[in-house]
Image: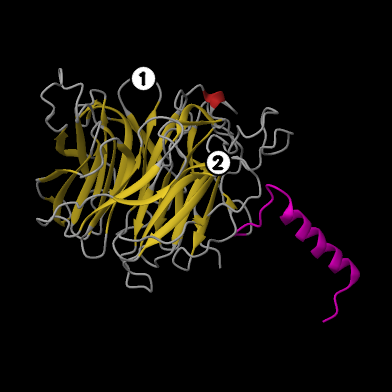
Amino acid sequence: MRKTLWMKSLITLAVLLMSLPGRIASASSGTPTNVNISRRSGNESEEAIAVNPTNPKNIVMISNIQEGTAGLFKSVSFDGGKTWTGQIIANFDNLGDGCCDPSLSFDEFGNLFFTYLYNVEIQVPVALSTDGGLTFRVVANIARPANTNPNAAGGERGLFRFVDQPTITAAKGEVWMVFNAGGPMYAVGAPVAGLGRVGDFSVRESIPGTNNCTYGDVSIGPNGQVMQVCSLTESGQGGGKVFVNVDPDGLGPAGFGDRIFVTETHVGGYDFIPAQPDRSIDAETGLAWDRTKGPHSGRVYLVYTFEVKNESNNTDIFVRYSDDNGLTWSPGVRVNDDRTTNSQFLPKIALDPTSGNLAVVWYDARADAGTGGAGDTNGIANDDAQFWGAFSTDGGSTFTPNLQISAGTSNSHASHNGTDYGDYSGLSFYGGVAHPAWSDNSNSTGNNPDGSLFKLDIYTASVSVPR
């Protein structure tokens, strides 16, 4: 059919808009409905979120609070994330004196595992809920390993100095948690036989070759094998190398093998960018293992932040995959599709166990040119952020056009949080719907008690795979 002149003009205009910096074709018809989960005074950040596979309407989110007193913020939904009921937990209740770094994972039985840090960082608790996150009880306290350095004083120097940033995952009849022990990464595992039937965390090991490697993640493969990832080094602004270790038989006798190099990142353990001026960022590596029976079953995916040129603040989000248990990796695929040199940071990856599709989300400063408009709050370039995401339906080879998930634009420095947006964001993906969780002070929903561009609340949205 012959196009009229005005139709050709509209098409030309659309192509022009897509070519402008920061203007991206959406993966769906528009920004999804945002929901403020926390709606409380003060800052919340570093959110973990999980969907119950035995009841996908049941979603649980836990985050840090800033106030400096004991506690974390927990909120539970039983209607797919439309409404939430929240409370402060780990404030000298049965979960102890909690401070920070929550991590959540549902397993196939409906067990919800929760790990975090106590204010006294000498052991890591593991808590369990069998009622969809309504209540938890501590089932293990994993002590910091004994210091093996004979010259250490008071346990403050040497290989095992502290505990930090625990991450937990559960599947295939096992649960695993890794944390930074102030030197090597440390891993613990336990068998799971059903709802509430969790065995002892008797498998404990220091992961080989991970001294000064930190800010990691852990994932379980289709045969019960386990992979951990971490970034070297734990400090500084430059450098940055990603390594993985694999335990081929999970709870079996083999143990983790030596480290395998994956990629350079140019992102140090404390890499300061305008949008994270107080806390800084790291490469924030993450894993997702395909345990479906789909075409990419057995493939493990790794997300990370890459700085194009060291100290350029031009950071991008990349994904690689491995089909041989981490021995070799594909070339990196750039997930963010902007044409700016602004920052993308704190990515999270999740795999839908019903389809094998991937979701990746991150904070994104692409729209902040410092010239006003919806992406700029203060006339300064690259220091404001929105929350964006993308999907892959072809095994990580390509990603959809990026979707702006947050309805508003936030500025973390304005929150006076000290940790800005925190060290990580949250994401769970099930049944074709991704549920991200992020820190937001845009007040786009109008129900932040502290108003706009001040304290951070936790937001979420239900984001469907584009058709």
Question: Image quadrant of residue 67?
Answer: top left
Question: Image quadrant of residue 381?
Answer: top right
Provide residue 254's location: percent of width, then percent of height. Answer: 12, 56
Give, as a three-letter code, the residue at label 2.
Answer: Lys
Residue at image mark 2: 309
Give, as a three-letter code, the residue at label 1.
Answer: Gly
Q: Residues within 10 Å of mark 1 (few under 14, many from 20)?
A: few
Provide residue 331's location: percent of width, then percent of height. Answer: 46, 60
Q: Residue at x 32, y 54 (%)?
A: 52
110 to the left or right of 205: right
Q: CA distance from mark 1 to mark 2?
A: 37 Å
In the rendered image, the vertical position of residue 92 relative to residue 170, given as above or below: above
In the rendered image, the vertical position of residue 363 relative to residue 80, given as above or below: above
The reply to whether the magenta stretch includes residue 11 is: yes
The first of marks 1 and 2 along the sequence is 1
Magenta-colored span: 1-28
Dot 2 falls on a residue whose secondary structure is loop
Provide residue 287's location: percent of width, then percent of height. Answer: 35, 52
Dot 1 falls on a residue whose secondary structure is loop
Q: Quadrant of the C terminus?
A: bottom right
Q: Residues within 10 Å of mark 2 (few under 14, many from 20)?
A: few
Residue at image mark 1: 68
Q: Residue at x 17, y 56 (%)?
A: 250
Q: Residue furthest right?
A: 5
Q: Is residue 154 visible to us here?
A: yes
